[in-house]
Image (cartoon, grey):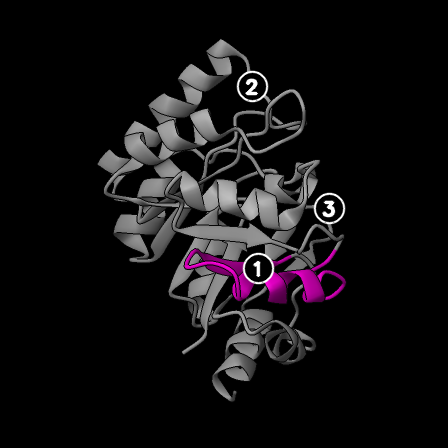
Amino acid sequence: MIQVEICTPSRASAEAAKVGGAQRVELCRDLACGGLTPSDDDIEYCVRTLGLRTHVLVRPRPGDFCYSADELDEIWQTIERCKRLGAAAVVVGFLNREGRIDEILTRKAVQLAAPLEVTFHRAFDEARQDPMEALKAVAACGCHRLLTSGQAPTAMEGAAVIRRLVGATSVTILAGSGVTPANVCELIGLTGVGEVHGSCKITLPDGRVQTDALKVRQLIDNVNRI
């Protein structure tokens, strides 16, 4: 059965995702900059009150994925808090100064997060190395899952690369970026992925981005028809 993950940048979005039938979310904030670490209160709300399988984005700031010592300390502390708060997984990504997967930091994140699952996020898509080589690095670090658009702007554009990744590893490939109810079935057919990631977002009159329950329902229904 294909698993669906909904990217939710707020409590209201997580609530909408649940109304739409989602069982799993990637919780973050400030989606406009690619997502940042959510508050502890929001993590606990999703886990305890909504009862959602909550994968928490751990990213202290926008920009690149090469962090200072202080930022790394913040990341490690956040991972520890996610464990205490009942998260199911953490979502991280580290690149070194050469733009390659930082295996030392990724391994440390995996070790600190245990027994939680670890998803390596779309920092992978900004890596300056061959995708198959980058995948081997992610797998060697013990990550359970890779969120990727196949190093393209959207998952549909990167479908050929995603398909290669799916066939080359035991790491779960989670296809994300530009995934909609309209294209999700085609994307799954093209790539062979077992998991998809979508925001199902709308822009509110005040400019805020929020998950739309109807789009979530449509996405899940379409996936379930496969």
Residue at screen point 62% across, 31% down: 100
Q: Which numbered mark, 3 or 2, is in the foreground of this view?
A: 2
Question: Can the viewer see residue 198 in this picture?
Answer: no
Residue 222 shown left or right of residue 129 in the figure? left
Judge whether 130 appears above or below 13 on screen: above
Q: Spatial distance from mark 3 to mark 2, Cα to Cα?
A: 30 Å
Task: Tell which circle, 3 or 2, labels the residue nearer the N-terminal end.
Answer: 2
Which residue lies most toward the bottom here?
225
Q: Earlier in the sequence, mark 2 or mark 1?
A: 2
Seen at 46% across and 34% down, the residue is 58
Quarter of the figure with residue 177? bottom right
Q: Amino acid at mark 1?
A: Leu
Q: Which residue is mark 2?
A: 67
Q: Which residues are magenta?
A: 154-176
* 77 shown above or below 197: above
Residue 225 covered by magenta stretch: no
Residue 5 seen in the figure: yes
Of badges 2 and 1, the one in the foreground is 1
Query: Label 2, label 1: how many angstroms apart (C-alpha)?
Result: 27 Å
Of the 4 image quadrants, the one containing the N terminus is bottom left
Q: Which residue is mark 1?
A: 165
- Which numbered mark, 1 or 3, is in the foreground of this view? 1
Q: Is residue 165 left or right of residue 47?
A: right
Which tag, 1 or 3, sits closer to the chain's start? 1
Q: What numbered label is drawn on residue 207? A: 3
Residue at 74 percent of width and 53 percent of height: 152
